[in-house]
Image (cartoon, rainbow, N blue to C red):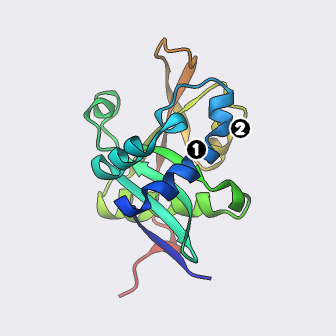
Amino acid sequence: MSEVYRLAELKDAEQLLDVTYRAYQLIRELGLHWPAANADLALIEDNITANECYVLEVDGTITATITLSNEEEIRQISPLPFVKWFAAHPDYSNKGYGGKLLDWVEEQIILGKLGSPEVTLATAKKHPWLVGMYERRGYERFVELDLQNGDGIMYLMKKTLTNKPEFTQRG
């Protein structure tokens, strides 16, 4: 089994659209207005080109994706690196691929490449398990927002990063 962590390319857009749309089914059912939940191919392609969209590919199949935002609007809320559009392929659920990709992006990209000791993300209070999942991964709520768009309370969460031995570079 080969695992490849990499930046997404435009040629991945259709596969990313499928993964994201299927993974965000509950988000749509909850009536949340997250762009990724109803993305079309053009929005996926824009995300790949405008941001840093990372994937975990297992034996040639994208099993998870997460985006490091380059959007200026997000920097106005928090100057820290911000991750979004986190999705794991439903056909590969409970195999830990989403967590592996998130760990890799936190350690290799945010801490290693950017040198930032912290990372942020946002999630909805009304989601039945996301807040708890992120808290178990070390994220803490630091801001509550209501954007008045029907999503209700959104939590900005941040995590302090530390080097983990399994991701250290070997020379």
Q: Which residue is mark 1?
A: 21
Element at badge 1?
Answer: helix
Q: Residue at x 43, y 59 (%)?
A: 54
In the image, residue 90 sits, relative to residue 158, either above or below, namely below
Mark 1: amino acid: Tyr
* Percent x, y of residue 139: 55, 43
Q: Residue furthest top?
A: 148
How many numbered marks are there?
A: 2
**Residue 102 visible (yes or no):** no
Q: Earlier in the sequence, mark 2 or mark 1?
A: 1
Side of 55 where 134 appears, left or right: right
* Percent x, y of residue 6: 41, 68
* Percent x, y of residue 63: 59, 63
Q: Residue at x 72, y 32 (%)?
A: 128
Q: Residue furthest bottom?
A: 171
Side of 17 where 49 appears, left or right: left
Q: Which residue is mark 2?
A: 129
**CA neighbours of label 1 inside 10 A, class few (<14), some (14 to 19), many (20+):** many
Which quadrant would the C terminus be assigned to in this image? bottom left
Q: Quadrant of residue 113?
A: bottom left
* Percent x, y of residue 69: 35, 44
Q: Residue at x 58, y 77 (%)?
A: 59
Closer to us: 169 or 63: 63
Mark 2: amino acid: Trp
Element at badge 2?
Answer: loop
Q: Residue at x 25, y 34 (%)?
A: 72
The residue mark sitting in front, 2 or 1, is 1
Closer to us: 118 or 60: 60
**Residue 85 visible (yes or no):** yes
In the image, residue 116 sits, relative to residue 58, either above or below, namely above
Closer to us: 130 or 85: 85
In the image, residue 128 sits, relative to residue 151, either above or below, namely below
